[in-house]
Amino acid sequence: MSRPRVAIIVTGSELVRGERPDANGPFLARESVAHGLHPARIVIVGDAAEDLRRALGGALDADLVLTSGGLGPTHDDRTVEVVAEVTGRELRVDAGLVAEIEDVSRRIAERLRRPYADFEAGVRKQATVPDGALVVGLAGTAPGLALEHESAVVVVLPGPPGELRRLWEAARQVAPVRRVLERARPPGRHELRVFGASESAVARALAEAGGDGDGVEATICARDYEIHVDLLFDDAAAPRADALADELAERLAPYVFAREARSVEEVVLALCRARGLTLATAESCTGGLVAARLTEVPGASDVLLGGVVAYADSLKAVELGVPQELLARHGAVSAEVAAAMARGACRRLGADVAVAVTGIAGPGGGTDEKPVGLVHLHVSAPDGERSSRLELHGDRGAVRRRAAVTALHLVRRLLEQPVDVTLPAHGRRTPA
Amino acid sequence: MSRPRVAIIVTGSELVRGERPDANGPFLARESVAHGLHPARIVIVGDAAEDLRRALGGALDADLVLTSGGLGPTHDDRTVEVVAEVTGRELRVDAGLVAEIEDVSRRIAERLRRPYADFEAGVRKQATVPDGALVVGLAGTAPGLALEHESAVVVVLPGPPGELRRLWEAARQVAPVRRVLERARPPGRHELRVFGASESAVARALAEAGGDGDGVEATICARDYEIHVDLLFDDAAAPRADALADELAERLAPYVFAREARSVEEVVLALCRARGLTLATAESCTGGLVAARLTEVPGASDVLLGGVVAYADSLKAVELGVPQELLARHGAVSAEVAAAMARGACRRLGADVAVAVTGIAGPGGGTDEKPVGLVHLHVSAPDGERSSRLELHGDRGAVRRRAAVTALHLVRRLLEQPVDVTLPAHGRRTPA
């Protein structure tokens, strides 16, 4: 696949120091891929002119250069000036732009009750653009720009993510950018999401199914026990990509939970919705993470009633009806208490399905018998129950995330299995 | 401040396509800053040799080049070969390394029940290193390397974050890396965290307090209504940095919630702990986010009893004792219901302090009277109560995150205020 190449340059001192993760580079990269372009690199630099100059200068052999940030009114905001320098253009004050930015600034001055004179230098600075640059729109007082330089098109976008997205939308409509996009063809895409298989098992299945290449590009991305496989393909390779996706899904069948970009919480909510079941959570060590993931999905409220974060044992008893005697005999982190939490959530909250999580997230609280990372899960549903004992690795955050995602998959597996009418409700336990 | 310069190069197709956020670049950047080095840029490239060659070739004028990833056993893993190429070194098979990697591989083969022959080519490939490179350690079967090239030291690290961190630790002990670190001085650091002030108000306060420069570098980082200010300084600038931090804290006094890297949930838990108070949550639209943030803090269990995610109105009634009549009259998103949720959580869960959140996270569910983004908060504590009505902007995720962080700050503000003994408990409402 020969695709137009994109270089992405992100500026921000806090980003190059690692104080905040950069969202704009990955966003522009995903947009590039979706339009059939090849993101060749993402470069993050601070606000030193020399660092930005080198990054931009080294990017001009790409077909499209996308920059984020450095468009503000102060002297630290240097993107426009450096773009002019590396493309050998004069800077000029754009009279129309002065009027537009002045208008915005006067409104800001009024709102802040500050004299407009405070803004005047900034307005002039932000209305100064390289000769021949097209203004694609304003983000606050900062213009987004597009300009051609030899075989490259440079698009200058603001740093705030919402504004960047809006002006990228606008930039795609201007002629030079449109011409680059017309040379690309958005690729086809197959997605496959699996849970419970190792990354190397997925890689092996892919290789055995024929592997990528010949117009199909595969990426395998592992995260907290889920593995997402993405196949991007050219038009000509569509039959091969379809066959590869089917073959891969078959080889990984026991582990596949979605053949599209769908999260496990969406799958769980859809499974409940299809059967008219309500859902509740009963969480100890995950402390609300399972409920928070489920409620992140718009429209979750038609399935999810809510849940109890029973962090203290007193709440396990009071809110979920876990017998004190059970807590005393087996301890809060036990299969017995997990089962009592799930059943209590069904009974007390009036839910058809409930998932319970109890474990030791660490760093303290572990013993030889019950080490940090030990987690018990239990799901109760009208057709039966499932439980699982996990020994998770990682720090507190990882143990909590992994327990939460595994709990959601346990619900999914129970609801996906064919209804077995020979077993009494709430009378069955299957190891996950 | 003239500090040794660091260039960070991260490889990974899924990273350059924006499919997964990169954690290694920011980690190495923070490490660089902490050791007094200047991270000049972070470059993310895929596994195309040409892209990696350009990134590495362009980095050799830095004092320290740190690479992450591309050390695996397959032909797509090209970092070592490209490092050899750009530094003009021969590749050679290291016999000692062959023995070590073979040992690890034989154990893996045994565990996977596969013939060792499957691994042999990979072992040879991973034991092939540039002439003169020092092996700093093994990550699985991948060696981390350090080598000197003219005035630069190149450190080659693996991609999996845990392994990268471990081998970075080891790399800091080898002589060439140590020599770079010895030329740097770890900077001093002051941190200030504020809530409720605008980013521009913080920038203005910084400027009015004297601004950065002269050996002090400031970064201002805004995130969901919190702003974190970091001052890094040279030894010589310590008095100026101390004065600047004090002056800034004074100017922003009503908004400052920490003068160190401390989260609001840590502050809230500490305030409760200091007064022997227990805490509970009652969440609707945030669906467990407040509880999840509090339980992310190790040791939260001595303060936090837990909480109720009362997503459905039935749970607000059953678990929190909110009267049906109140729900019918005012609707679930109302100041009255928020107050009843908080008081119900205190009463039903036996907590001293409870925080309630009810709102419309969107995208659906808004009306003219109660638009998406409307959120009511309420905190009940032994000394009194506080409530707040918010109209939040952003998508569903942003509304939820912002509601959660504002709820935590509402608890903090109530607990920070001097105890006013003239008012009866639970009888006071102050706008936030």
Image (tube, coloured by chain):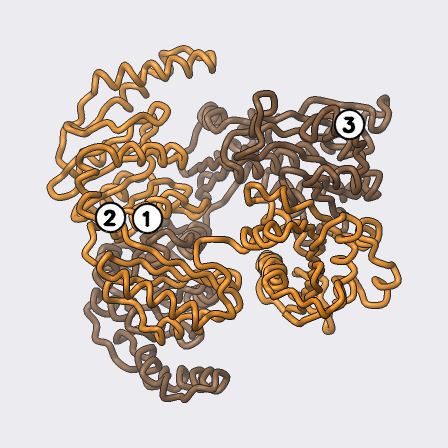
Chain colours: A orange, B brown
User: What residue is shown at x 43% (from left), y 86% (from top)?
Assistant: B114
Three-letter amino acid code of the residue under disc 1? Ala
Dot 1 falls on a residue whose secondary structure is helix
Q: How dense is the environment of label 1, judged by Cα within 10 Å: few (below 14), some, or many (20 and up)?
A: many
Which dot marks residue A6? 2
Q: Nearer the viewer, residue A25 or A233?
A: A233
Q: CA distance from mark 2 to mark 3?
A: 57 Å
> Seen from this angle, which residue lies furthest front?
A421
Q: Nearer the viewer, residue B375 or A105?
A: B375
Q: Which residue is mark 3?
A: B326
Q: Are marks 1 and 2 in contact (CB under 8 Å)?
A: yes
> Quadrant location of residue A243?
bottom left
> Residue B242, how many percent across, how many down?
53, 36
Q: How dense is the environment of label 2, judged by Cα within 10 Å: few (below 14), some, or many (20 and up)?
A: many
Q: CA distance from mark 3 to mark 1?
A: 50 Å
Q: Which residue is mark 1?
A: A29
Dot 2 falls on a residue whose secondary structure is strand
> Residue A150, how many percent across, how many down?
11, 41
- Please identify, in this view, whether the residue under mark 3 or under mark 1 is nearer the observer: 3
